[in-house]
Amino acid sequence: MDFTLSAKTSEYAAKLQAFMDTEVFPAEAIYEHQRAQLKAAGKPHGLPAVVEELKVKARAQGLWNLFLPHSKDPHHGLTVTEYATLAEITGWSPEIAPEAINCAAPDTGNMELLDMFATDEQKKMWLEPLLEGRIRSAFAMTEPDVASSDARN
């Protein structure tokens, strides 16, 4: 298999690495400070404001929803192999970078599923806000006759 990067992937990788170097890595100390403040305020699951600031910057630089497949956006979309290169770059700051570019799990997979299988009403209610980065999602699974919350099963 040929893993030579396409021109498009190389361009995105360079832009993303520059974003990581100039925006994400310098924001890590701020992120940790803001997390500590949220925790002290009784909001341990709150999102540090610096992440929202990074989202605005990433979107302005065209580093948004990079996981979207080529089939959905032939001019900008990437193949899974192409996207893997970018995911590797964001892996250097796993708590900040994926969310800053709206490519954090489980949202990416949930957006793909909603895009493929949701009704128009469900897409309007859930997919559009996810693609815009206004909401986050979750994934839950259970089996017939057994609660997934039962740790004994």
Image: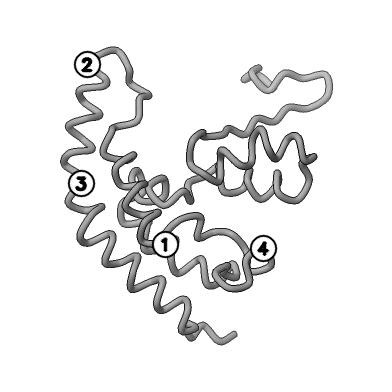
Q: Which residue is mark 1?
A: 62
CA separation, marks 1 and 3? 19 Å
- Where's the C terminus, which quadrant? top right
The amino acid beneath tag 1 is: Gly
Ranked by sequence position, the earlier of labels 4 and 2 is: 2
Question: Along the horizontal axis of the image, is 143 left or right of 66?
Answer: right
Say which of 39 and 117 sits in front: 117
Q: Position of residue 77 (x, y in %)?
A: 58, 67
Question: Which comes sooner in the sequence, label 3 or label 2?
Answer: 3
Q: Residue at x 45, y 69 (%)?
A: 85
Tell me the number on the disc at residue 72: 4
Residue 2 position in % (x across, y down): 55, 87
Estimate the spatial distance between the alpha carbons at disc 1 and disc 2, rounded to whole Å.
35 Å
**Which amino acid type is shown beneath numbered disc 4?**
Lys
10 Å crowding of disc 1: few (<14), some (14-19), many (20+): some
The answer to which of marks 1 and 2 sits earlier in the sequence is 2
Q: Quadrant of residue 46?
A: top left
In the structure shown, which secondary structural element does the residue marked by tag 1 occupy? loop
- What quarter of the picture does the N terminus occupy? bottom right
Residue marked by disc 2: 40
Residue 91 against residue 35 in the figure, above or below: below
**Which tag is nearer the camera, tag 3 or tag 2?**
3
Is residue 9 placed above or below 28 in the rendered structure? below
Q: Secondary structure at mark 3?
A: helix
The residues bearing labels 4 and 2 have C-alpha atoms spaced at a distance of 43 Å
Sequence-wise, the earlier of marks 3 and 4 is 3
Mark-to-mark CA distance, 4 and 1: 16 Å
Q: Residue at x 51, y 82 (%)?
A: 3
Q: Position of residue 19 (x, y in %)?
A: 28, 61
Q: For the residues carrying marks 1 and 3, which lies nearer the camera in this image?
A: 1
